[in-house]
Image: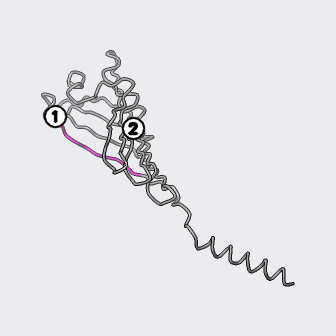
Amino acid sequence: MKRRLVVAGLTTVWFVATGFGTPPPPRPTHVYVNSNSVDINTTDCAFPVKIQTTGYGIVHTMFYPNGSRKQTIITQPTTRVTFTNLDTGKSVSTPSVNLTIIRYDTAGNMVAKTSPGLMWRIVVPGKGLVAADIGQVGWKITFDSNGNIVSFDPISSGIRDGVTVAKLCDVLD
């Protein structure tokens, strides 16, 4: 009987100590963000161009055990960008289904940001591929022990045309 009381007492102490000890790390979060933005560009072509982005994104955030952000991933499974000549109504569009990955160190400093995948791909019937940004773009940051930036290294691979409205003037005219 005495042994049972000792075991029960130690078990209770263990449960209380671990129950009120270090809290578990925060659970990952997932937030849906709808996009329906419109911008009008009046400087790059001889006519106004409407740039409309539609779709949704999902922001996933993971945490270190200390509660600081470890990584944020933004996915855009249905995002589409349409460029329209407002004088003629002629338009071209592209899926923009890339993702963005942002990594942090345990102190909360951003240490890398990359966007791999399909950012833009403009294909026009009869002309073929007009412009594309496909692959990976981003940078990696290295800090010293005092939190000062030691290096800032760009990351780039794939087709990097740098899609701009000015590159689409001919196909929208």
Please, what secondary structure does the residue beneath circle 1 have? Answer: loop
Q: Quick check: is 35 in the magenta stretch?
A: yes
Q: Residue furthest front?
A: 145
- Residue 27's place in the image compared with 158, above or below, is below
Q: Nearer the viewer, residue 52 or 7?
A: 7
Q: CA distance from mark 2 to mark 1?
A: 32 Å
- Residue 121's place in the image compared with 108, above or below, is above
Kindly identify which residue carries mark 2. 114
Residue type, mark 2 in image = Thr
Where is residue 53 drawn, in percent x and y? 32, 41
Residue lying at 25% horizontally and 33% vertically, measured from the top left? 84
**First in residue order: circle 2 vs circle 1:** 1
Residue type, mark 1 in image = Pro
Where is residue 8 drawn, in percent x and y? 77, 79
Q: Toward which corner of the image does residue 89 lie, by quadrant? A: top left
Report the side of 91 relative to 13 (left or right).
Answer: left
Report the side of 26 relative to 165 (left or right).
Answer: right
